[in-house]
Amino acid sequence: MSLRRDASTPLDTFRLRVAHEDFGAARRWVRRGLARRPATLQLSCGRPHYHGSRPPKFSFTLPCRRLHLPPQEAAPIQAIDNELPVLEDLKLRKCHYSFRYLASRSLENLDLDDCCGRKVLELHLSAPRLASLRIDGVDNPPVIGSMPSVVTASLTYGGCVSMVYVLTFLRDIRNLDLSWTSFLDMDPKQLPSFCNLRTLVFNDCYVGAECQVLRLFLQNAPSLDTLKLCDCDFRGGSSSSGKRKKTASSAERATRAYECRNLRSIDFEFYDLDDISVLSDMLEDIPKQVEFADFLMVLRRDASTPLDTFRLRVAHEDFGAAQRWVCRGLARRPAALHLSCGRAHHHGSRPPKFTLHSRAGAFTCRLRWLHLSRVRLATNFEKSLEKELPVLEELKLRKCHYAFRHLASRSLENLDVDHCCNRKALQLSLTAPRLASLRIDGPDNPPVIGTMPSVVTASLSYTRWLFTVYALASLRDVRNLDLSWAHSLDMDPDQLPLFRNLRALVFNECNLGAECQVLELFLQNAPSLETLKLCDCDFLGGSSTTSAYECRNLRSIDIEFYDFEDISVLSDVLDDIPKEVVHRMESSIGQHRKITISYK
């Protein structure tokens, strides 16, 4: 819906999504939208093409009630209290800011998601009506100040000092969610008393030796109703002795007892390799009759019964110790293996190594689905794939590192390589005669070439057209093709193959060249094309020699773009299609427009 000229009618919602490079030119649309006095403003800027580029700057001068800004450089915060007197909801996603004070008498919800305030040691907040607070991201400074009405808070801080510092200003909170925090060297005296706390959640937190941190929270939360522990670190031991005593005297229990009169339920999720005996001892100290059921399915001792699926998720630092659980799982001859490793605490750390040992075929003879995440594949993986995995049908690699240059499998039908890294190989040679689906996503993946005669659907995401065309040379018989993020125009037109069976073609945020040369080449080389879709692509001007293309089976073309983009070059290309247009439909959401053209 475009903006009407009658500025007397206020807007309910004004949404604008703009590319990073075009944000400066789009400021006039922001001013036009704000001139309509919207109740809600949602402004989103795309990712920059160049890593390290600063987000564009945003400033506002008119009031609205809800403000969502992902990702931008936040405006001068003085405008929050002065120019936004009725603001209730403020959401900043991947924004940069340098202000230290934020004040609003009307603000009720504040959400800071992966924002960056590196010059700010702490953010002072004055919001007497604030009811919900969410801080997510390691680069966010501690949020402190006057927040007497906060009911729900979700905090993600890597450091214990920042977390405890923020909690001192949330004494009256009712629902508290803490994530990704290692409570090391915490002073027990710094933790405040939460008289109104009802729900407490720990996600991927280290709760201290012998659950000391968890005990402190229970002691300081007498009205707690619900406690949830999800994938937390329960490490035994104490500062004075290396082993925990099996029994405790009544005097010792009395010193560490806590009321928990209103406690109704405790939920905890963990993996088989976690030792939760320390947690069990702590639960015995609760002076209530607790009933709970353990729904965790463990590996049975009878190894004669094969498993349908074996899933294992392990922290980066504990992957070495978890190798025995991988061996135990493979010993049960699973049909599917899902292995995921957590993120490393130190930036730049190499993923742990995953190896399929030789003569493992006795345990992997039934393995049909293999999903690996954040691991480093051994150099012998290419040999193991062919010899030890004879019935493998689906292979998914997510954020993995590998160094091999060839993969061969007679049974593989689906290959998905998502943001993996292979810097040593210029290309990945693939021999998979039964492969039907191929997906390559990520700038660090080399071109995949080889023998793939049965591929029906392919999705390729390369930043260079050269790599894309190089990979397409092995996909001549593909029927559905999705190309994304190809910007560098370094391709040779003579290298593009002929796609006789291509039915559906999709371009996502690609540079189609001067006068849409790239698009014209694909139309010339795809005589059986039925459906074409262009989503947020770049249409550059220039000079080009236009040649005819048949497109006898073309049925529809979908074009998605923004109002400020000039698509006149694309219109000239579409006029050369020798088919009669039956129907043309236009729709828009904010400044994002969509045109659907149907042919006879």
Image (cartoon, rainbow, N blue to C red):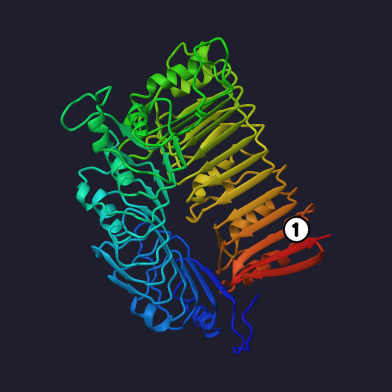
Q: Residue shown at 37%/24% (left/top)?
A: 322
Label total for image = 1
Residue at x-position 65% and y-position 70%: 588
Q: Image point 77% across, 68% down: which residue?
A: 584
* Quadrant of image for the N terminus: bottom right
Q: Counting other residues with Cα less than 10 Å from the Cα at mark 1, is it few (<14), some (14-19), or many (20 or more)?
A: some
User: Identity of the amino acid at label 1?
Assistant: Ser
Quadrant of the frame with the C terminus:
bottom right
Please identify the residue farthest to the left as the structure is shown.
240
- In the image, residue 274 sits, relative to residue 562, either above or below, namely above
From this viewpoint, is residue 345 visible? no
The residue tagged 1 is: 556
Given residues 340 and 167, the one toward you in this image is 167
Q: x and y percent of residue 383 in the render?
A: 47, 19
Q: Give the answer, above or below, for where 208 lies relative to 9.
A: above
Q: Is residue 32 left or right of residue 527?
A: left
In the displayed structure, 239 sits above or below 382; it is below
Q: Nearer the viewer, residue 409 or 142?
A: 142
Name the spot of residue 95 as percent of width and height, x first: 38, 64
User: How far across and how far down the image is residue 510, in percent?
Assistant: 55, 57
Query: What SS does tag 1 mark?
Result: strand
Q: Is residue 180 above or below residue 507?
A: above
